Image: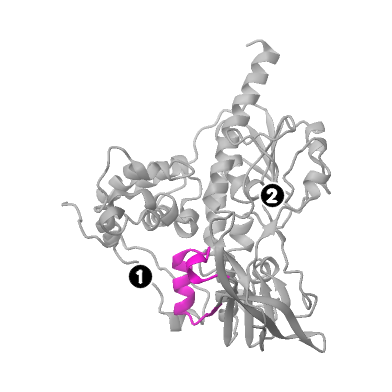
Amino acid sequence: MPPNMSPKKVPIPEQKPDERIKNFQEVALGYTPEQAVQESLRCLQCKTRPCVAGCPVSVMIPEFIKKVSEGNFEEAYRLLAKENCLPAICGRVCPQETQCEILCVRGKKGEPVAIGRLERFVADYAMGHMPQEVPEIKKNGIQVAIAGGGPAGLTCAGELARMGYDVTIFEALHALGGVLMYGIPEFRLPKNLVAKEIANALSLGVKIEKNVIIGKSITVDELFQEGFQAVFIGCGAGLPSFLKIEGENLNGVYSANEFLTRANLMKAYDFPNVPTPVKIGKRVAVVGGGNVAMDAARTAKRLGAKEVYIVYRRSEAELPARAEEVHHAKEEGIIFKLLRNPVKILGKDGWVAGLECVEMELGEPDESGRRRPIEKKGSNFEFPVETVIIAIGGTPNPLIRQTTPGLEAQKWGGIIVDEATMKTSKEGVYAGGDIVTGAATVILAMGAGKKAAVAIHEALQKSHSQTTGA
């Protein structure tokens, strides 16, 4: 077929805003086979493959897209799955616009190839049409422990299991997936799809121990005593940060972590079929401007809030959320109160009754490169809300570093690693994902898990050779 030289991506079908705010079904509906082929024909098949350099897990992007253009979706999936064990998830939630797509040559004179949408299409096609293909694996009898069943831990576990290791994941919650299950809303990432993709990733014989808190149920040192020869820590950064302002202890104040966990793992999205585990008022203020803030605001809207506000201390140009998420939030009627900063949560009879803010203006750039917000003196104002959700990030739970002698960490709590190997200061211990970087992306966490798996394999094979004299 001739190349598609349109400067625009093939549009992806979506639910209409006035319909989707009444349900938790996916907003983006995915490409049809015909649309996927047309989009794949926009790829120039560059010999230099610049897009691959932007992928943290080094997916063979031009190769799998070429197979899509030929209508060979099964082979496209095989090429994709060689490097990415969670492609249906990544196709939905990865920020391709700042990673692979930003480097696409087509983006110089138009829009880049829709790599993420094609990844989603191929993965969804495989899930619906292809039997699961489990490779033959020769076990080596070496045990490796994974702390945390999120994207980093799942990737590290899958890679090591493929190499023949006996891998056990220790997960603190009752469901694997980490942020994939408790953090990202159903309308962006359906939980049945997450469960299927996790099952595929773990079909290589990985053992699962749920409801186990590393550092409390069992320590890292005790894992070594039980026979594990390496430990990968991928427990994320789920300890929420707060504003430290008056009123944060009122009823009706949530961290975004708690709010989204109640909506996802406790299935508030299935109300009224299940008793709702989350209470919100008619007016909700979400403090923050990242993807988590957008997720919380859009979830609150679907749970029945009449007015939902995003309160952010910088301007729209500095919003850290993906442009697509901001666009969808605006379409759904989320109200943006920008250049505003909360200074007090107002209460009545122990419950949230309003929010007091000050107006801000932008000064010179700070260490993050964004213009520093400066308070306008005397600009205080109040507005009524019954629920406040704090979405300003999180830090790692200190439990692991407090119970693991010799494990060095940053002042803010992130574990220090060698970036080439993800090795920590403690022998045999590796770490990756948000517990190292702070809150980041799913694909970056997966890239860290993959890198750690390679380093663990090399270290254990070297140790085994020295021990056996082989």
> Which label number is shown at residue 360?
none
Q: Nearer the viewer, residue 367 or 177?
A: 367
Magenta segment range?
A: 314-337
Q: Nearer the viewer, residue 41 or 273?
A: 41
Residue depicted at 44% across the width and 54% down the height: 98
Q: Is residue 460 above or below residue 71?
A: above
| Position of residue 201 measured from the top left corner of the image (x, y, whole percent) | 54, 46
Q: Is residue 262 above or below residue 128?
A: below
Q: Is residue 65 magenta?
A: no
| 116 sits to left or right of 39 | right
| Position of residue 3 measured from the top left corner of the image (x, y, whole percent) | 19, 52
Is the C terminus in the top left, top right, bottom left or bottom right quadrant? Answer: top right
The residue tagged 2 is 235
| Position of residue 141 measured from the top left corner of the image (x, y, whole percent) | 67, 27
Q: Is residue 172 above or below residue 61?
A: below
Residue depicted at 55% across the width and 62% down the height: 364
Q: Using a 10 Å C-alpha cutoff, classify the residue at mark 2 as few (fewer than 14 neighbours), some (14 to 19) or many (20 or more).
A: many
Q: Quadrant of residue 299?
A: bottom right
State the CA–CA distance, disc 2 to disc 1: 35 Å
Residue depicted at 56% across the width and 51% down the height: 198
The residue tagged 1 is 13
Q: Amino acid at mark 2?
A: Cys
Q: Is residue 321 magenta?
A: yes
